[in-house]
Amino acid sequence: MNAPEPALTASRIVHGACPHDCPDTCALKITVENERVVKVQGRAEHPSTHGALCTKVSRYAERTYHPERLLQPLRRTSAKHEAPRFEPVSWDEALGDIARRLQAIAARDPQAIQPYSYAGTMGLIQGESIAARFFNTLGAARLDRTICASAGAEALNATYGSRVGMHLRFFAESRLILIWGSNSIASNLHFWTYANQAKRNGAKLICIDPRKTETADKCHQHIALLPGTDGALALGLMHELIVNGWLDQDYLDRHVDAWPEMRERALQWPPARAAEVCGITEQAVRELAREYGTTAPAAIRLNYGMQRVHGGGNAVRLIALLPCLVGAWRHRAGGLLLSASGWAARVKNPQALERPDLLAGRQPRTVNMSAIGEALLREASPEFGPRIEALIVYNSNPVAVAPDTGQVLRGFQRPDLFTVVLEHFMTDTADLADYVLPATTQLEHLDVHTSYGHTDVLRNDPAIAPLGQAKPNTQIFRELARHMGLDDPCLQESDEALAAQAFTAAIDPELLKSQGFVSLDLPEAPFADGGWPTPSGKVQCRSPLYGLPDHVPNRESRLSSPALAARYPLAMISPPARNFLNSSFVNVKSLRDIEGEPLVEMHASDAAARGLEHGRMVRIFNERGSLQCRLHVSERARPGVVNGLGVWWRKLSPGGENVNAVTQQGLTDIGGGATFYDCLVEVAGA
Ligand SMILES: Nc1nc2c(c(=O)[nH]1)N[C@H]1C(S)=C(S)[C@@H](COP(=O)(O)OP(=O)(O)OC[C@H]3O[C@@H](n4cnc5c(=O)[nH]c(N)nc54)[C@H](O)[C@@H]3O)O[C@H]1N2
Ligand SMILES: Nc1nc2c(c(=O)[nH]1)N[C@H]1C(S)=C(S)[C@@H](COP(=O)(O)OP(=O)(O)OC[C@H]3O[C@@H](n4cnc5c(=O)[nH]c(N)nc54)[C@H](O)[C@@H]3O)O[C@H]1N2
Ligand code: SF4
Ligand SMILES: [Mo]
């Protein structure tokens, strides 16, 4: 056991975890030779990774050793509205100057300092640990991290009491799987492996998605509804389940609150009404209800794609009720999975990692990240407080990924805004920084992870030393705290010490270290006999906060805003491209080569109506902005809807703009989420 490796190979294997914002959270096997990572593979021993990674992360070494990696701190030498120019500076000089600038602002009002971070890494240590402690010590503004999932998450909380659902592996045993608002082959590959197993065993797979995705190609059936109409479809299905007597009345009676009221509402949604709103046939609604009402076990893989619209929260609440109506939860292979993060929350210890107690009674304002453009442009006022004077960005690329680029840019270009960006690369956001600080990648730092798609906890050991002068986020915030004279010892704790505080006693740290992952001990069919984590123990049709769910239409659609639709008649969705992860990997050439160039998919009838032919450059536009890309006349688009695949770097796009030039900053009905797919546009020749 543990015999030293023969010296001549100088080769070793390190256990890692994929850091990306992906439900799969794969376990990595990293091969290091002569202190260089030569291979990144999936661990065969990890149940859901089963030895295979997606194309992107198989190329992770290419990303880490990329010739354009940021390896030293940089200071801006051009004005914000000019082409970006930077000069290298020492860490001491950079941190000394940043500390002085932040101290001056904090002396006036620390709330004028705004952190902005998301899921560039999902790691608990390189995410919100020392960073959160640092901002809490200062009393800086808080950030509502809503850009991806908050509508759906809040909907699950309101309905189930937490973000809980089926276990990933049991989808393999389902007889019917609805893949709803998810391009699983692209964005949730390891779920697809289980779904495919079910398919081989004779299960029926139905995809519900405005776009005919590569996943829809592999399903038995595809229902191409209009964006933002999922709530209406769920209500139509409920209507049919009721009138045809396909209900598990015993489950409803014992484990669901306020069903009689919900039943009355659903009865107002005959299939014809639902079909009209969804832009599909009445027959499609009836047949889907029949499949769902008469097949057991039936499972739903819901994903966040469908909640990026005004009514996203209500839609998730309605869909989350469906498995309760038919008693699907009685089977381990029945029910629904949107997020498993509520299971992980039971073993996490954010109080210890983030130390909200350091606020010491202060209640700084909270800024919603999905409307960062608006926030950066707001003047000081009694309701808002001070103008945002400093922005510290880490683990995110808001100038590319946040909605309504026009406003976001105007905000970032404010000459009086002091911006610091911690990054691997010169992203669109780094281009607008005053200081750019080089951060380490997952191969160079320690971290621990939970998952929102499965129920394992993972550890990521550093495989190599930091490249160049790069430092882990934690180290950057430790050193910044020292430069600012913040002397609480908790701001200096090591990554290993932080890892030891990340979880409750339910996770054995030694086991996690030696094995690289630990699976949570959970029942196979957690809600077979109720026991929902709500106050009543029952699923809530009616929420004390939000009442009964209903279909909430898009802000921008033919039915809800006809005047706007007359000028901008096409609904645009901008789902992820398979070979990028949000805006990450766009600068990795081998992956960019697979994606080719920014494109928009349009149905032949819409192209013909505009005299546009396949392959030409077009302009997508609305009142917020415009972008250029290549037109694909394609069966992947349904009439009335165009698909602009995201999220390209602006500066790597033909006209210097990406899909977010046209998306809006309006928020979802509940949860304050972003509404990227609630967006009317027109398309014309460029
Ligand atoms: N390869 C790859 N994988 C990723 C990502 C990536 O960028 N690339 N992103 C990661 C992230 S951040 C997340 S949050 C997760 C989940 O990521 P999601 O954004 O949920 O990703 P998708 O699975 O592509 O799901 C979006 C699907 O929803 C569809 N859709 C859009 N609007 C609607 C609608 O109104 N109704 C319905 N029913 N469907 C709609 C889109 O056409 C698309 O196929 O995936 C992660 N995995
Ligand atoms: N139009 C449109 N816009 C979208 C979406 C869409 O579907 N359509 N999807 C939305 C969704 S679901 C999400 S989740 C957001 C995602 O938005 P972001 O969370 O901003 O994700 P990324 O674009 O991947 O950018 C993450 C950045 O973090 C950096 N990074 C990674 N690891 C580290 C680290 O350890 N330290 C530091 N300092 N930096 C690191 C990466 O280099 C990368 O530039 O985008 C949203 N934007
Ligand atoms: S991006 Fe997703 S599928 Fe790819 S390696 Fe990471 S966790 Fe696995
Ligand atoms: Mo996301």
Image (cartoon, helix red, strand yellow):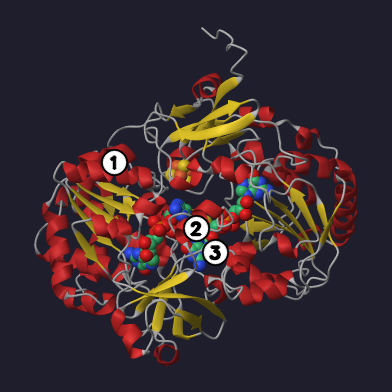
Q: Ligand 1 within 8 A of label 2's CB?
A: no
Query: In the rendered image, which residue does mark 3 sit on?
Result: 648
Measure the C-alpha gap from mark 1 to mark 2: 46 Å
Q: Residues within 10 Å of mark 3 (few under 14, many from 20)?
A: many
Q: Ligand 1 within 8 A of label 1's CB?
A: no
The location of residue 431, given as percent across then percent down, is 72, 63
Q: Upstream in the sequence, badge 1 or badge 3?
A: 1
Residue at x 50% of width, y 38% of height = 450
Q: Are marks 1 and 2 in contact (CB under 8 Å)?
A: no
- Circle nearer the viewer, 1 or 3: 3
- Circle nearer the viewer, 1 or 2: 2
Residue at x 26% of width, y 59% of height = 217
Q: Secondary structure at mark 1?
A: loop
Observer-nearest residue: 649 or 525?
649
Total number of numbered discs in the rendering:
3
User: Which label number is shown at residue 527?
Assistant: 1
Question: 60 left or right of 406?
Answer: left
Query: In the rendered image, which residue does mark 2 sit on?
Result: 593
Residue lying furthest front: 8
In the rendered image, the vertical position of residue 511 relative to residue 308, given as above or below: above
Q: Ligand 2 within 8 A of label 3's CB?
A: no
Q: Amino acid at mark 3?
A: Trp
Observer-nearest residue: 141 or 81?
81
**Picture quadrant where residue 559 is located:** bottom left
Question: 672 left or right of 427?
Answer: left
The location of residue 605, given as percent across then percent down, is 29, 84
Residue at x 82% of width, y 60% of height = 86
Camera sees residue 223: yes
Q: Upstream in the sequence, badge 1 or badge 2?
A: 1
Observer-nearest residue: 197 or 374?
197
Measure the C-alpha gap from mark 3 to mark 2: 13 Å
